[in-house]
Image (cartoon, rainbow, N blue to C red):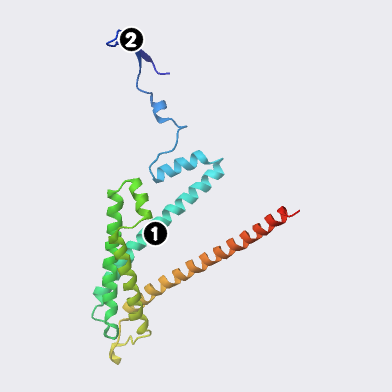
Amino acid sequence: MSNEIYFAHETNIGQAIFVQESSPPSYDEAINTNGPPPTYDSLFGKVRKAQRSSRGVQDFLKNIFIIVLGTLGITIILGVTVVIPVCMITIGIVYIHDCPQGEYIPVYLIVGGLFGILKQLLHLSARVRHTDEERREENLKQSPTQTLLNCFMLGWFIIGSVWIYKEYQPNYNQSLGIYCNKTLYLFAFWLVTSVYIVLGIVTIYLCSISIVTLIFHKDGSDEFERNQSP
């Protein structure tokens, strides 16, 4: 237990007020392993929180596995959002003169990649400058710059889709006349198509969840009415 020192301080009315002064806490008291986990959102903090909330070794390992998967998923998403724009710019510049049949396809890749990197830089700078509370507020509302950027990227994506699908199955052989480089076209084609595939999967998933929720809600309402009836 910490040593306690008491001293008296004379007030201007002649009364003594005792003030308790404690010595600095020990190392064990400062660590306080039974206290709450760190407030910062880091991997170490998540591991400590999982250790405290786990009911055994098996439960702890399961929680660690979930944390690792979540961290890996975030890392993959961040990597994709950075790597894809860089690849778009690189391929668009390398093959900018190699697609006369779809001359705007390289332009679409270059501009889309540049704005994709700009979006990530703005997002990163906002997270660095803002506090945790400001970040939570930012998640609820977007700045005018982000809104304008998102609208432009959506419109650019639609325009690029038209340019790419309009030239579907282009001539890849330069000796046969007007052509488009195979690497350039297939990269742009599958880049746009993969976005539509992901949107389709997400839409089907959300519709399925909504239908299941409505079914269970209806069954619960019918059961409640039966229980209320005499």
Residue at 32% across, 46% down: 131
Q: Please tell me in which quadrant of the rendered image residue 150 appears.
A: bottom left
- 94 lies above or below 132: below
Residue at far front of view: 230
Instruction: Give the x, y percent position of residue 77.
Output: 39, 60
Where residue 110 is drawn, which disc sits there? none
| Left or right side of 57 for 176 | left
- The three-letter code of the residue at mark 2 reads Ala
Residue marked by disc 1: 76
Quarter placement of the N terminus = top left
Instruction: Give the x, y percent position of residue 174.
Output: 28, 88
Where residue 16 is drawn, which disc sits there? 2
Q: Tell me, yes or no, whether the two marked residues, 2 and 1, touch with CB atoms within 8 Å.
A: no
Residue at 55% across, 63% down: 210
- 81 lies above or below 126: below
Residue at far bottom of view: 176
| Left or right side of 93 for 32 | right
- The three-letter code of the residue at mark 1 reads Ile
**Which of the two residues, 143 or 85, is positioned nearer the viewer here?**
143
Within 10 angstroms of label 1, few (less than 14), some, or many (20 or more) residues?
few
Residue at 46% across, 49% down: 67
